[in-house]
Amino acid sequence: MENWFVLEAPALIDTPALLVYKDRVEANIEKMISITGDPARLIPHVKTHKMQEMVALQIDRGIKRFKCATIAEAEMIARAGAAAVLVAYQLNDPKVDRFLELVKEYPRIAWSSLIDNIGSARLLDERFGAVGLTAKVFLDIDNGMHRTGIAPAPALDLARQVKALPNIRLIGLHAYDGHIRDADFAVRKVRCDQGMKPVRALAAQLQKEGFDPPTLIAGGTPSLTVHAMHPDLLCSPGTCLLWDVGYGQQLTEQSFLQAAVLMTRVVSHPGPGLITTDLGHKSIAAENPIDKRAFFLNLEGYEVISQSEEHLVIQVEPGKEPAIGTVLYAVPYHICPSVALHDEARVIENGVQISVWPVIARRRKISV
């Protein structure tokens, strides 16, 4: 639908503002499920949206397990009513005690976290054992990204050491291959499949040695369409719920919809062919080069030339400057850090705001 992003009454919303289009989010959830074939195969990451209402939409469609990176995100998921939560982060002091508080407060939830070394495993064993509980963990396997995790070969010895601890239980392997983002799907598939071979070999060896059959969680959004082809894998996309320009350009076989827009206004004409908006560093992520920050949906023939904390300056053809007060709609190259800059999202349906959703897990702490 052309101009799907335009509001009927933009004067009611101050800028800069984060707009979330509910029908497009729901379409992305349906697409995510259709790719995997079963909501039970999904364990979506919540880092992109950080909103409890977004988790609830997925639960309503049969998705019960979720992945997160922070304790606040974990608490948000619990509040939404999920059945299982994986904190995809290695817990050390004081996070381990905050995590344990959640485990005790929400005993119906299947809680788990990641480890990649015996020291962190022993810490979990000690703290959980002190309150008579068992910590469930996934080994964080480094299959090429080299950000966190342990390589598949030494992971076998770590698993054996974990098995000897009385208050910790190894339930699976987690392999995030976020470094694989080839635009050519065939190339991406070969690289993703190759990266999972040693992970599967490790899983087979663990079963030979008497471990419970490990649950395998693989990849994120870029590798979703690869790992979904393998029924033994759980998939954990996240960005596809809101989508952005970066993945839209790279992952051409994934037909997700842009569902989050940053609304801004022209606030100044500093010179011929120059317009300034209120979309500064504090409203849209500044992690990418200046020409890869904001992509405008209702502006043509422009170039973003500078940005500061509260301003973004755009060059247009002299004489074609939009009037001061004009509403512009932009999508970021990378949506995740941009959402985290906003306290709330204005929820839009058919051009009208129907609700406001707090971006509650942008906070480092909710209650725990």
Image (cartoon, rainbow, N blue to C red):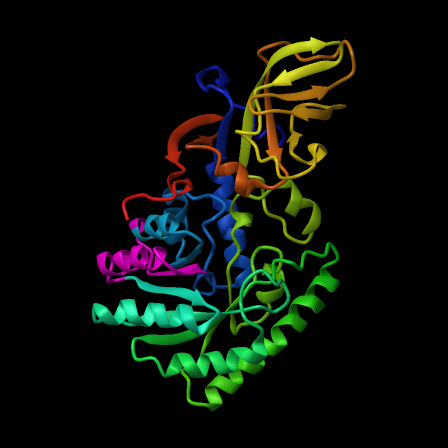
134 and 266: which one is in front?
Answer: 134
96 in the magenta segment = yes
Where's residue 182, x and y in %? 72, 57
Q: Quick check: 327 left or right of 65?
A: right
Q: Is residue 294 left or right of residue 105?
A: right
Q: Is residue 87 above or below residue 20?
A: below
What residue sits 67% from the left and 13% below the top?
322
| Residue drawn at (46%, 38%) of the image | 22
Magenta extent: 79-108
Out of 187 and 171, give the one closest to the viewer: 171
Does residue 213 appear in the picture of this structure? no
User: Quick check: is 227 in the magenta stretch?
Assistant: no
Q: Position of residue 314 (x, y in %)?
A: 70, 21
Residue drawn at 64 percent across, 71 percent down: 195
Residue 315 appears in the picture as rendered: yes
The part of the image, by quadrant, that contains residue 299 is top right
Q: Relative to 91, say whether 203 is above or below.
A: below
Image quadrant holding the N terminus, namely top right
Position above or below: 308 against 109: above
Q: Which of 127 and 140 lies nearest the eye of the viewer? A: 127
Q: Is 166 on the left or on the right of 244, as rendered?
A: left
